[in-house]
Image: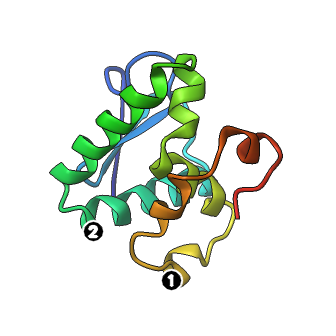
Amino acid sequence: MKVIYNDIIPFGDYTAINLFGIVFVRKGKTLSDKSYNHEHIHLKQMQEMLWIGFYVWYAVEYLIKRWSRTRDEAYDAVSFEREAHAGDDNPDYISSRKHYAWFKYIKKSAEQISEGGES
């Protein structure tokens, strides 16, 4: 994965964003090992969804979840984010990750997230 530090992308208060396998990091911020692993998980998700499929699915799922949640809650509830957060502390996650692992996070309820039931 290529990492680019700059003043423009990502927008808003985000530190990093992965766009087609290129991680853009806000200049002056640090991309921790955990954040790098998080973005690497997104890269694997993008590859298995053939890139465009990842962004289409992400947008549709976010919009559905945004209907009844705040912006941050909807973001955290997206299945791709839930998998990435669940695995980003584990440096070996990528090597043991099963294809479409994010799919199991679609049906988990928001209560399971808040109770720490991500596994």
Which residue is painted at 46% across and 19% down in the image?
A: 67
Residue 99 sits above or below residue 28 on the image: below
Which residue is painted at 36% across and 21% down in the image?
A: 7
* Label 2 to label 1: alpha-carbon separation: 15 Å
Q: Nearer the viewer, residue 72 or 37?
A: 72
Q: Nearer the viewer, mark 2 or mark 1?
A: 2
Q: Nearer the viewer, residue 102 or 85?
A: 102
User: Can you say which quadrant of the picture contains the C terminus?
Assistant: bottom right
Which residue is painted at 57% across and 16% down in the image?
A: 70
Residue 51 sits above or below residue 119 on the image: above
Circle 2 residues within 10 Å: few <14, some 14–19, many ≥20: few
Query: In the current view of this chain or complex, which residue is farthest to the bottom?
Result: 96
> Quadrant of the rendered structure where residue 58 is?
top left
In this figure, what is the number of numbered marks?
A: 2
The residue identified by callout 2 is 48
Which residue is painted at 56% across and 38% down in the image?
A: 77
The residue identified by callout 1 is 95
Q: Earlier in the sequence, mark 2 or mark 1?
A: 2
Q: Identify the secondary structure beneath mark 1.
A: helix
**Residue 16 image position (x, y, % from top left):** 45, 36
Circle 1 residues within 10 Å: few <14, some 14–19, many ≥20: few
Q: Nearer the viewer, residue 118 or 27?
A: 118
**Residue 87 image position (x, y, % from top left):** 62, 63
**Residue 82 image position (x, y, % from top left):** 57, 50
Kind of residue at disc 2: Glu
User: Can you say which quadrant of the picture contains the N terminus?
Assistant: bottom left
Kind of residue at disc 1: Ser
